Structures are given as structure tokens and as C-alpha cells.
Amino acid sequence: MATMAEVAARAGVSTATVSRVLAGKPVRPDSAEAVRAAATELDYELDRTARSLRRRYSDLLALVVPDVENPFFTAVARGVEDTARRAGLSVVLCNSDDDPDKERRYLAIAASENMAGAIVAPAAGDLPVGGLARKGATVVVIDRSVEADVDQVGFDNVALGREATRLLIDRGCRRIACISGPSGMGTARDRELGWRAALAEAGLEVPPEYLRHANFRVDGGRRATEGLLGVTPWPEAVLATNNMVGIGALQALAASPGDEPRPEVAVIGDLPYATTDVSGLVQVPLRPRELGVRAAEMFLERLGGFTGAARRVVLDGTTTGAEPA
Amino acid sequence: MATMAEVAARAGVSTATVSRVLAGKPVRPDSAEAVRAAATELDYELDRTARSLRRRYSDLLALVVPDVENPFFTAVARGVEDTARRAGLSVVLCNSDDDPDKERRYLAIAASENMAGAIVAPAAGDLPVGGLARKGATVVVIDRSVEADVDQVGFDNVALGREATRLLIDRGCRRIACISGPSGMGTARDRELGWRAALAEAGLEVPPEYLRHANFRVDGGRRATEGLLGVTPWPEAVLATNNMVGIGALQALAASPGDEPRPEVAVIGDLPYATTDVSGLVQVPLRPRELGVRAAEMFLERLGGFTGAARRVVLDGTTTGAEPA
DNA sequence: TTGAAAGCGGTACCAC
DNA sequence: GTGGTACCGCTTTCAA
């Protein structure tokens, strides 16, 4: 690989000038032309490693998600990527597996690689952004919220849970079960609170066995649903508090024998890969791509110099905290 | 952030010694201890940018896939990631969107970032690995094959198409349609060839309208299936040549009105997010995770110094070319 | 075993 | 507008 010095020599200018040309800074047209020609002839390719070392940051943005296999997060990734690309940033997608250690490792790497920053859907409540913070890198938290003083974008999960439950009630369901997520996961807890609230508002009561905690994956939803089918009286409806759990619930129902009336299913989230017509389901879609876009925009604003207080954006809802400059 | 020089000063040694300690090279125990202590106290974190500049390669591996939203490729990513991590490599997941330009861009970045190399599911027939090759970086091609002289891992797509079709024939289907991929995509063409071969072997003939070309996404499969439902006589079975197309086909059938006998569906690939019981479908599973694992292993072998001829590995099948050292 | 020092390939400041 | 050059933080000879 040719180096900048070689390009400079060939073009009869200094490396400083080459650097300027590449950066689009003012340079006499003829030397700019000479540089470009030399670069082409030599097949020159800038070494980003050297650049990041000197500049103290690279054009890489780490996106850390708890599960790359969840279509929700791949859709988020699309949104982030499309937005970041326009600003010349490339996205490094990292899978934390909901494991705080892995998450910490990836964030440490992001810091160590001098990445521009990270967009993180945190695995645990506390976010180990120490390294990034020390380097002054940008951090945006998505989906789940944290205490830390950083920009955050997410949903109003209580409202989501309440809305889904209300829709079920509107359909005439009264015995409504809820499959929540792991205890300790804020989004799950909030959606569950919304469910409780909607039940309370409608004056409905349900047995405690109607609340199940599942991991937020397909198998969790399946097992929880199987469990619910064993409860007497059967629930008339099941609220799946995320997409994967919803898939599991539908699979469990599809596999369960008999012609008894089956519970209705409501899903918070989208089912892009459903193999049935899901238009009959109660669904509360989430727009994950928009989540990614919004997060990336906030990220870019920070990169562009915005220094206001940490913002909390609730998608399809209110924004609290400082507005973008 | 503390630098290595600061750690060295605090430990009363030179940066060379600090570097050695961090690399696990032989150093007197007491100075090693001093270095570790100083590093901890200062919260020292190695700067990988500087390291890669000096070493001429980083611990990053680019995985370039045509569609991150396809569960097939996220499963591949899992396999790659799990395997690479054990060797201390982090995986940068890049979405080429089946666009050769994007692909080229990502590969150029990988080269420019001095990444260890790339594992690529190529968008087009020719693979623009120029930069990586020049730098001596490792390249492994997966899923689709290319002319280039690089390690490759994939499936025997003709066999897959043939097997799926045979299974349909065994079920008594005779009029079997095929939804293939974009013309020009080798994997699609081969699976389609397998379909033809199986039909021929069984002495079956089908009208030309039974072959459809779709993009390899859900909407493509849906539209193609809708088209097939308009053909007289209706096909008794539809072979979906990839997972997304299979989902689309199932969606189209689920949405189509009427009680007419519906075509059977065979799918090459897996349907992890199906919302129905798919055990009744004809399925030819693909083990994408294994594909990723195998590719990463080959990658690591090269990194470890293996210099034999380019290998072509066919999963669940034969291996041609040199064996790993 | 260890330290001094020369880079790796850019960027950016400073003087012209 | 341009060139000289110090420097980013680490790795790796080379000598001691």
C-alpha cells in the first residue's frame, strides 16, 4: 500500500498538502489536481489507523445490542446505519448477549479503538461507559433507560402495556394474562405495570398465576404460554410484552392440541417474519428503525458539537430535557 | 486516559517493559507486578489505534453480509462471533444490502483500518478484496462462491434444491413450482437447477410459469406466490429456495381466501420466527451457525499461519482443496 | 531481562 | 496557500 509520503513525493508537494486535499481544505487547484492524480496512480488508500491515532477518534460507531438475532434490533441497526452513513460513519454492530461482561468488553474496545462513540441498548441497569466517557466519546442509550447522565431514546413502556391491554379489553376479553420479561428488566416491568393499570382502570382482577416472567426470547414465550394454558380458568387473552415472546406464544398455541377456544394474543412489537396472517392479532407496533434513526441523529448532533444537557426522547411521545441545538 | 508512558513512569520501568508485560512476554516477576499495579491504579487501557498502527493489523474482523435482517445471516454472525472471540478477535458486522458499492466500501474500510481480514457473503460475482489482499489480510468467502482464489465455505445448493424437491415428490406432489432468487445469484440458480434435476429424474414436467424469480426477501416470496396462485393448473407444491421467500410464500397462502386445496410449501432454510407450527412443512435446514463457525475457523487458521492453497468447503459434504494444517 | 530510540502513517501547528 | 516538523501511543529492534 502506498503511503501519503509517496503520494506527496509523486505530486511534488508535502504530505501536509496531500492531507489537505483529502480533507477538502483550500489548496491551489493545480496541486490538488496533481495530488489526486498521484493518489489514483498509486492506488493510494488512506490509513485510518494512523489518522485515528493522530486525531484521537475514528469514523466508527459501535452499536451494542443485547441480541442481534432479534429482528427488533436488526431493524434498529438499519436505522442507525442508514443515518450514520450519511455522516460518513461506519457502524460496528456488537452483540452483548445481555451479558454485562460482554457489554463492558465491547465498550472498552470501542474506547480503546478511539471510536467516535457508542449507541447502546444496555444489558444491565448500570452502563459501563467509563472508558468512552473519559475519552469524551459520545454515548446514546436506546430502548432501556439508565441512571447515567447520557442522551436516551426509548418508548413509553407503561403506555405500551396499557394500550395493548386496553385493546384486548375492547375486544371483550376480561381474563387477561401477561408474559413479562426477566425481573429486573425495566422495559418489561413497565409494560407489565401498564397491563396492571389497564386492568385496574377497567375494574378487572386476575389471578396471580396470570403473570409470568420469561426470558425475552422465543422459547421463553413458548414455555410461559404452555404454563398459562394449564391455569384454570384459562385466560381469554395473553399479552406478550415483546416480539420474541409473542412469537413463542403463537407457536405454543399453534402446537397445542384440541379445539377449545384459544386465548387471544396481543403483542407489543412487530412480527416481520410471521408465517401466518397476523392482521387479526392485537398488535402495538414499535418502529424500531425510527428508534435507530433518532438515536443516530442525536449521536450526530453531539458529534457536531451540541453540548446541552442529556436528553430523554420518548418515541411517539414527549421529549424531556434539552432540545437539539 | 493514562498512556503507557505514564504507567511505565509510575512502575519505574520503560514502556518497552510495560508492553512486554501486557503481551505476556518474559519479564522479571517484580517489575511485572509493579506494572500491573500501576496499570490498575491509573485505570490504564491500551490504545488499540496506536497498536494497530505499529503492528500493521488489528484484532478486528469484518463480517460483510448482504442482509443483516435475514435471520440466516444473524445466525452466521453468531457462529463467527463466538468462534472469533475465543481467539481474541472482535467482529464488525457490516450490511452490504446486496449492493456491490456498499460492499466495496466496507472492504476498503476494513483494509484501511488494518483489520485482520474479512469474512464475506459476496453481493456480486466478483469480490473487491483488492485492498485487503494488498495488505496481506485474510479473506474467507461464505454462502455464495466466487472465482477468486480465496477460502470458501458454502452449501451444495444443487443438492439442496434436489433434496427439497424430492421430498415433495415423495409426498405425492407432481406439479411443483419453484421460487428462485434474482437471476445472476449463483445460490439461487443452483437450487433451481436441483429442482429441475429432481423433476427430470422423476419424469415430471411443469409449465414454464412454474418458475418464478423473486428478490430473496419476504415481499418477493409473497408476490411470487400470489402470482403462482393465478396459474392454471395450480401447483400442488411450491419450493421456496430461501428462508425469506419461504416466509413470504406462507404469508401469501395464509392471506389468500378460499378453501381450495392449498399448495404444499417446501423451504430451503430455517424459520426460527415462524408463528405457526411448521413441523408439517417440507424443510431443508441449513445450519447457518455452523457456516459461521467453520468460516471463522478457516479464518483463524490463516491467521495462525496456514498458507496452503485456497480451500473450498461444502458444509455437510465434501471438502475439496487443501486441508487445514 | 531491560531501556533507548526509531518508527508506524497521518494531522495540525507554525512560520513563511 | 504551503512545507517543515512535532507528535499521537504503541511495538520492536538493538545494545547493554
Image (cartoon, coloured by chain):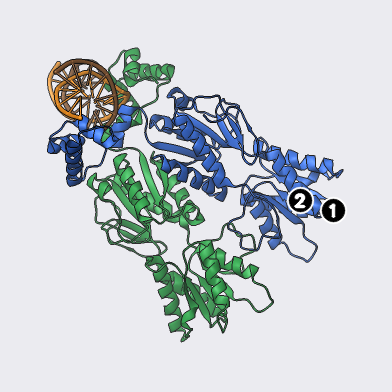
Chain colours: A green, B blue, C orange, D brown
Q: Is residue B235 visible?
A: no
| Residue shown at 72% from the left, 61% from the top | B256
Residue type at mark 1 is Pro
| Residue shown at 36% from the left, 65% from the top | A318
Q: Nearer the viewer, residue B284 or A240?
A: B284
- Rendering coords of residue B68 (x, y %): 51, 46
Mark pair 2, 1: CA separation? 21 Å
Q: Which mark is residue B99?
A: none
Query: Eyeballing the image, is B239 above or below C8?
Result: below
Q: Nearer the viewer, residue B132 or A22?
A: B132
Q: Which residue is mark 2?
A: B167
B176 horizontally vs B22: left or right: right
| Residue shown at 43% from the left, 73% from the top | A192
Q: Is residue B264 visible?
A: yes
Query: Eyeballing the image, is B31 above or below B41?
Result: above
- Rendering coords of residue B48 (x, y %): 30, 36
Mark 1 nearby-residue class (10 Å; few <14, some 14–19, many ≥20):
few
- Rendering coords of residue B7 (x, y %): 17, 38
Q: Which residue is mark 1?
A: B233
Single out the residue that lies furthest toward the front: B29
Q: Nearer the viewer, residue A5 or A226?
A: A226
| Residue shown at 56% from the left, 42% from the top | B291
